[in-house]
Image: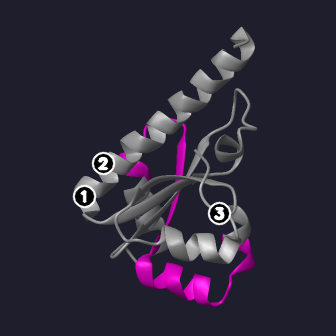
Amino acid sequence: MHKALERRRAEREERLSRARAFAEEAQKALSAVSIWVYGSVARGAFNLGSDVDVFLVAENLPEHPLTRSELLFRWGPPGVEPKGLTKGEFLRALAKKDAQLLRALRDRVLIRDDLGLEPLLAELTGAGPRS
C-alpha cells in the first residue's frame, strides 16, 4: 500500500477514535445512545484543520440549546464537534423526512447504536453507514 494512503487511513482512524472516546463518555452519562460521525471525516474528505462532526441521539437531553451544547461538549476530546437530539426529536425529524438531517447523515460512520436507529436512517437515506 502506498505510504500516503496508509498515512491518510491512520489519520482518519485517529479522528474516529476521538469519536469513540466521546461515545464512551456519553454512554456512561446517558446510558443508551446512538452516535454517528458525519461530514468530511465520514466521507474521507477531511483536511488538517477538519473537526470530527458527531451526531448523538439519546432518550433525554436538556431542552435548552445552550445547556444541551454545554453537556455534549463536556464529553468531547479536542476537535470533536457534537450535535444532539432526543430520541423523540430524531424520530419526528425522520417522520418528516427532514432534508437537512437526512443530507447531513447520508454519509456517516456508525459509532454506537444502543437505540436501534440505524435501520430507520438507512431506509430513509438509501445508504448504510461507511466503515
**How much space separates mark 2 and mark 3, taking CA atoms?**
22 Å
The reply to whether the C-beta atoms of the residues labelled 1 and 2 are less than 8 Å apart is yes
Badge 2 or badge 3: first in the primary sequence = 2
SS at mark 3? loop
Crowding at mark 1 (Cα within 10 Å: few <14, some 14-19, many 20+): few
Q: Classify residue 115 by image quadrant.
A: bottom left
Q: Give the range drawn in magenta.
A: 73-101
Q: Residue at x 34, y 76 (%)?
A: 59
- Dot 3 amino acid type: Leu
Residue 49 position, x and y percent, is 69, 31
Q: Going by the image, does 73 lie left or right of 6?
A: left
Q: Mark 2 points at which residue?
A: 25
What is the count of numbered marks? 3
Q: Name the residue under label 1.
A: 29
**Residue under circle 3?**
105
Q: Distance between the residues labelled 3 and 1?
A: 24 Å
Q: Nearer the viewer, mark 3 or mark 1?
A: 3
Q: Is residue 32 magenta?
A: no
